[in-house]
Image (spheres, rainbow, N blue to C red):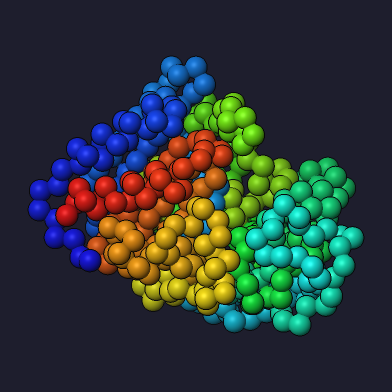
Amino acid sequence: MFLLVRKMSFEKLTRYMESLKDSHDIKGLDLIVKKNHKVVYRHKQGFNDYSCSRAVSENDLYYLYSCTKIATMTACMQLAETGRIHLDSPVSQYLPEFSSMRVADDFVVGDFKNMPNQSSPTHAAKNQILIRDLMAMTAGLSYNTTSEPILEWKEKSGNKASTREMMTAIAQMPLLYEPGTRHAYSLGHDVIAGVIEVVSGEKFSDYIVKHIFNPLDVSDVYFHLREEDRERIAAQYSIDFSTGKKSPKEGNSFELTEEYDSGGAGLIATVDGYSALLDALACGGVGANGNRILKAESIQTMSTPRLNPVQLDDFTMKGMFRPGYNYGLGVRVLVDDTKAKSPAGEFGWDGAAGAYALVDPKNGVSVFYAQEILGLMGVYSEIHPKIRDLVYECME
């Protein structure tokens, strides 16, 4: 589907956004839609502090959680373009501690309540983990951020272990399955951050800012909340799954130590700042200022579906993975456009507090939505698809 945009009316989308305060108790939100570098819709609503006295503004910062993964994949593809990272190379070529991995004997993919630990029976992995396995979540890693090795490294470093140092802890964790055979959401993109540090010689957060956001004229992005920005961070809430009660929540639990840059969930940014990246990816890798951050061919590589039928079954096990999508290199990819009003080839990802990123290279369209509620049921299965479909309905 290609959009033939005449006169756009976003009244239906605005009505839906306004309804979220009552239907889901979303106190503050921000949505931006761009087409070919131009903002065609922006809706800010509500308040971004706990007392509901500070209106949502363009100056607000959000914890983006897993929307970070799109920036991490962009960085990895930049280094692949220059030949410094090879997608089919073993991770151990860059991080030697991953050369001799062990696989849990009895883990059942999907049973994430019973994660293997250091005392679980294991056997030696037959396959090496490849860089593309990390990107496609087929490496066999888990998302256990409180594993014994991670906690041990946190303690002995005084909560100061660096991104590169924490790779040793992640490499000690048992794999869930033989690399390359199944799919499980994992710390794979955090490991990519470690690879990027080794290859570039730069701290991961510095690399992201210097090589992705600064070329797009964006400087207001971070991996750790600065003291002077505490008044700007959007008030974050967490919902207790057992009681349904919502309470204030500070910080980012995926920030494993004070010095750790999480490639999977560490980014803090404004809506304007992060949307500049999505806009560039939607426009062939070129930002609104004319600077290129990625080749169109690299974007195509990222957004090519990668999962075989068995892996696709693993991917669709979780409710946040919507009908019609496969998985590429760090992004979901729409393959069946009868399930959505966006075109096949549209890609993006979400964040744990409800952020939503969509990139449509066919039409030069990007969508970014930010809110801050961890554990909000229905955000992935209802709110995000509804926003997506209303954006396209309003633009057609």
Q: Quadrant of the C terminus?
A: bottom left
* One can see residue 303 in this view: yes
Q: Is residue 165 left or right of residue 389?
A: right
Location of residue 227 by image quarter: top right
Name which residue lies at 43% across and 32% down.
24
Question: Which of 141/100 is in front?
Answer: 141
Position in image of residue 21 (x %, y %): 39, 28
Q: Is residue 249 above or below residue 122?
A: above
Q: Is residue 49 left or right of residue 140?
A: left
Position in image of residue 22 (x %, y %): 38, 26
Name which residue lies at 43% across and 41% down.
370
Number of marks in the image? 0
Name which residue lies at 51% across and 40% down.
377
Q: Residue furthest right?
A: 119
Question: Which of 113/16 is in front?
Answer: 113
Question: Which of 322/214 is in front?
Answer: 322
Position in image of residue 105 (x %, y %): 81, 71
Q: Is residue 139 above or below residue 279?
A: below
* One can see residue 361 in this view: no
Q: Is residue 209 above or below residue 120?
A: above
Q: Residue furthest left?
A: 6
Q: Quadrant of the N terminus?
A: bottom left
Position in image of residue 387 (x %, y %): 33, 46
Location of residue 352 by image quarter: top right
Name which residue lies at 59% across and 48% down.
266
Q: Is residue 208 above or below residue 182?
A: above
Question: Which of 359/179 is in front?
Answer: 179
Location of residue 122 by image quarter: bottom right
Q: Is residue 100 left or right of residue 93?
A: right
